[in-house]
Image (spheres, rainbow, N blue to C red):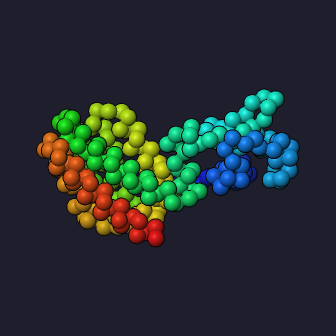
Amino acid sequence: MEALPRETIVDVLESRLRDDIFTGRHPAGSYLPPERQLADGYGVTRTTLKHAFGRLAQAGLLETRHGVGTRVRDYARFGGADLLPMLVRHSPDWIGEIFEVRRGIGALIAARAAARATGEHRAELRTLLAAVGAAGTPDAVQLADIDVHRALARATDNRVYVLLTNTLFNAYLPVRAALVGPFADAEAAHARLAPVVECVAAGDESGARAAAEAYLTATERIMLEGLA
């Protein structure tokens, strides 16, 4: 058994600062108050504040210039998809927009996989699909389903699709437990996903696209019902 991570004061401060940025308390382009004033306001040390600043700077939310101060970056203009898990944690409203991208990218990946999959890719997809039906718990079914989609992305022979797939799944992490609905029944989950794998294995691009659209639409509906 792996011990659960403990939340530190830096974790808490990072979360508070991030929420204050996303809610507009610290608007894009503005400079944060002086470090001493900000540390006193949050009830932390300046060392703790610097650690939190470092994390948020790495995430692309802050930039610090020596002798000038720390400014809030315009994440909507300059930020990347790596911010999605933070944004979903702050506001689940982002999930609807993520699902819209999921539908479009997922259907495209399935079609590309059908066109480019090798024999090795097809064998891997069949093996991973079987693991979906054999999984013993909803959580295990969900993880097995994710493995199939990662394999579909690899079968496109395009590394950007692999990274996009990883990004979308990472965006789900803050609310993954609430999205387990489509995976409560392993046999049903297998049946929904099987047509996608079958069309990809057969090299049927249009069939793979249609099957993926049907799968993504059905699972999105069930997931959104779980979030409601």
Residue 176, percent from left and from top: 46, 59
For residue 47, what is the image quadrant?
Answer: top right
Left or right: 197, with 221 as reference point:
left
Residue 88, percent from left and from top: 53, 55
Rendered residue at 69%/35% (across/down): 63
Rendered residue at 39%/64% (across/down): 223
Left or right: 172, with 190 as reference point:
right
Residue 162, percent from left and from top: 37, 38
Left or right: 110, with 176 as reference point:
left
Instruction: Inspect this view and state whether residue 8 appears.
Output: no
Front in this rendered view, residue 9 or 202: 202
* Image position of 66 with respect to 186: above or below: above
Rendered residue at 44%/58% (across/down): 96
For residue 29, what is the image quadrant?
Answer: top right
Q: How many labels does the image show?
A: 0
Residue 68, percent from left and from top: 79, 32
Front in this rendered view, residue 200 or 100: 100
Rendered residue at 32%/33% (across/down): 158
